[in-house]
Image (cartoon, rainbow, N blue to C red):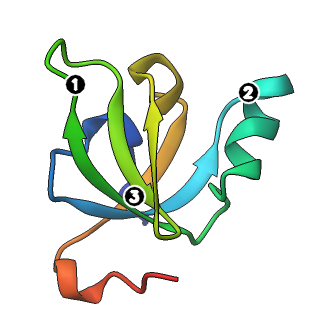
Amino acid sequence: MTHTIPLCALQPGECAQVFCLYTDGSMRRRLLDIGLIPGTCVECIGRSPGGDPTAYRIRQAVMAIRQEDAAHIQVIPINEREDAPWG
């Protein structure tokens, strides 16, 4: 069984692979447009001083995603940062 967590649970420096998006409408379209499709690797870069939003590296670009939206993205944690197949 695959162990998934919400994207918002990643800590700065941790990487994961997108498993599934549990959202719809315009937010789903926006997330797909920035490259958050199943199989995509994501790295948590850091959080704003207030804790929200969080910056993520997605397909070699840095995007800020609110915790409310990141909670609807399920990811599979990647144990070794070197294992992240960026691209």
Is 74 located above or below residue 40 in the figure? Answer: above
Which residue lies at the image location 47% right of the left edge and 17% below the top edge?
A: 68
Q: CA distance from mark 1 to mark 3?
A: 15 Å
**22 relative position to 55: left or right:** right
Q: Which residue is mark 2?
A: 27
Residue 11: image quadrant is top left
In the rendered view of the protein, which quadrant contains the N terminus? bottom left
Residue drawn at (20%, 19%), measured in percent from left and top?
51
Q: Do the CB atoms of the residues marked 1 and 2 lie less than 8 Å apart?
A: no
Q: Residue at x 74, y 37 (%)?
A: 30
* 86, above or below 43, in the image: below
User: Disc 2 on helix, strand or loop?
Assistant: helix
Identified at 65% across, 34% down, the residue is 22
The three-letter code of the residue at mark 1 reads Ser
- In the image, residue 23 above or below residue 18: above
Q: Tag 3: Cα neighbours inside 10 Å, few (<14), some, or many (≥20)?
A: some
Identify the residue position indicated by label 3 in the image: 57
Whole-percent x, y for residue 44 in the image: 27, 51
Where is residue 38 shown, x and y percent of the image? Answer: 64, 64
Q: CA distance from mark 1 to mark 2?
A: 21 Å
Q: Earlier in the sequence, mark 1 or mark 3?
A: 1
Q: Amino acid at mark 2?
A: Met
Name the mark on residue 48: 1
Q: Earlier in the sequence, mark 1 or mark 2?
A: 2
Q: Secondary structure at mark 3?
A: strand
Label 1, secondary structure: give it: loop
